[in-house]
Amino acid sequence: MSKVRVRFAPSPTGYLHVGGARTALFNWLFARHHGGKMLLRIEDTDRVRSTPEAEKAIFDGLRWLGIDWDEEPLFQFQQREKHQMVVEELLSSGTAYRCFCDPEVLAQKQKELQKSGSKWGYPGTCRELTKDQVKDKLSAGDPFAVRFRTTEGVTQFDDIVHGSIEINNEEIDDFILLRRNGTPVYQVAVVADDSDMKITHVIRGDDHITNTPKQVLLYKALGLPVPQFAHVPLILGADKKRLSKRHGATSVTEYRDKGILAQTMVNFLALLGWSPGDDKEIMSIDELIEVFDLKGINVAGAIFDETKLEWMNGQYIASFSASELWDKIAPVTQSYCTENNLEMPERSLGLQLADLYGERLKYLNEAPEKMAFFLSDPATRDEKGVRKHWKEDTPEQMKRLLEELERTEEWFEEALEAAIDIVAEEFNVKRGKVIQPVRLALTGGTASPGIFAVMTLLGKETCLRRIGHAIRNIG
RNA sequence: GGCGCGUUCGUCUAGCGGUUAGGACGCCGGCCUCUCACGCCGGUAACACGGGUUCGAUUCCCGUACGCGCUACCA
């Protein structure tokens, strides 16, 4: 295969959502797999909707995911003159013609035709104007658009994902190339730019399938080589409708802000609509690059399943070492502490916390809340838990435990275990009966890491204080 | 409406003419256990429908239904 060159071509009209991110990812994986180039093109020809903020958001999203690009991004609007020249070329070769029809009249006709159920198509009014007629209108200053002269026949192209796709040219209207205001239309821009950028493989969303024949027609009319196409299925919302900003098209950075890891996102997105063909699920970026193949792309749309994303994120979090994890959760912990006026834990404590919570987190951002009782005495207590675990004889047991703990000099797990066992034995109950009230006292809740680890990290003074406080305040 | 593309467990998917239709998430049991989480074991659950082709169709072809997409002088 000749040098692979692919491109991701977003319009900067909003953030980078998961659909766009996946398209970018597929392009990137393909390029990296083949040692080719990944290019970026900003399709900013819609001057009204394009914003620099959106542009930045897209760059940020890509960078976060680790999707890098080669060469300088191309800004489509800056290519405008080239696009106009392409139209000129088409005009002089006769594959395009000037259309002097009034767009409003045309729109009116279209409306009528559609209402009556017949097929709409440009009636061809200006298709066969003679040179003189054109010259007259031109010198009269009549405004015009430029249309492509679609001829009879069938347009066919091979899609790597879908196989051969063909469409009867009757279905392709004499589409506009250049608007009355002189600006070239999208179809012209893509073809010209893809050609300029020497794109070998156009990997983009399914929604472009019906545009492709028009583009193929343009490539041929211009005598340009037609690139390979791979139309990837759309990512769907829970309602199976195309993901849009109205429903569920979440920005990738929103996931980042919730505490989804970039590698989770990449791994998950890669598996949405693509499969390596085996049962592998957790795959590193390098592995993905290694095995990625356009042939593995699915044909049907895929629903974005957040539950599985959560699971996968949990898997990655659990695979981290304590120091890796702490590095990831320290920032959120820091802001949590600042917000709540708490002291930020030292790294040494942080590492121990990370160790405790590695297998208990689905999102990075859950960390501060889950670890909150390590940062300050619990302000509230789980009422249901109290009712369930704080019985009449509990205060008595707790008082005994307090005594045992007070005399515990060496504050480490085994010693604490022994202390609790002594009390359990005295009252002839299972150790769990003693532990749950302790957990309530120490953490305010009914779920936490192992109680001995919690006590060890909390330290003697804090444990005694909280248990004492619970005895005095519960029941 | 027209055209295009699609349709395997609830979800993501494997399958590429002969399989007890496999895996993963979820869910439900169980084990582990001081709770939670992890882990482990087990279970639930799918080839949209109808015709062909074939000795044999989830797999190939054609219809139907349904879904999605496109149908702009947006991209």
Image (cartoon, rainbow, N blue to C red):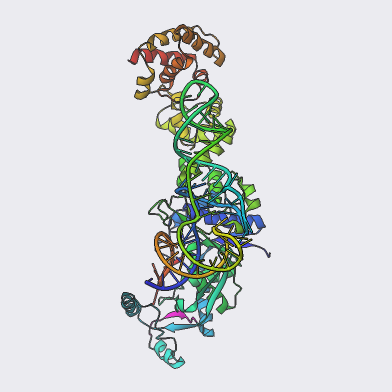
- Left or right: A267 with respect to A390? right
Q: Is residue A402 visible?
A: yes
Q: Is residue A41 visible?
A: no
Instruction: Specify whether residue A146 is painted magenta.
Output: yes
Total numbered badges shown on the rendered structure: 0
Q: Is residue A320 above or below residue A444?
A: below
Of A193 and A155, which appears nearest the observer? A155
Magenta range is A141-150
Q: Residue at x 47, y 9 (%)?
A: A423
Task: Name the magenta segment's main secondary structure.
Answer: loop
- Left or right: B18 with respect to A426? right
Q: How far from the left and from the top, in percent, is residue A217?
A: 53, 76
Of A346 and A475, which appears nearest the observer? A475
For this orientation, the residue located farthest to the bottom is: A132
Q: Could you say which quadrant of the image residue A143 lies in?
A: bottom left
Of A205 and A337, which appears nearest the observer? A205
For the N terminus of chain A, give its image quadrant.
bottom right
Q: How far from the left and from the top, in percent, is residue A205?
A: 50, 61
Q: Is residue A301 above or below residue A220?
A: above
Q: Residue at x 44, y 83 (%)?
A: A98
For the C terminus of chain A, give its image quadrant.
top left
Of A416 and A259, which appears nearest the observer? A416
Q: Could you say which quadrant of the image residue A219 lies in?
A: bottom right
Q: How far from the left and from the top, in percent, is residue A150?
A: 49, 81
Q: How far from the left and from the top, in percent, is residue A44?
A: 46, 63
Instruction: Specify whether residue A210 is painted magenta.
Output: no
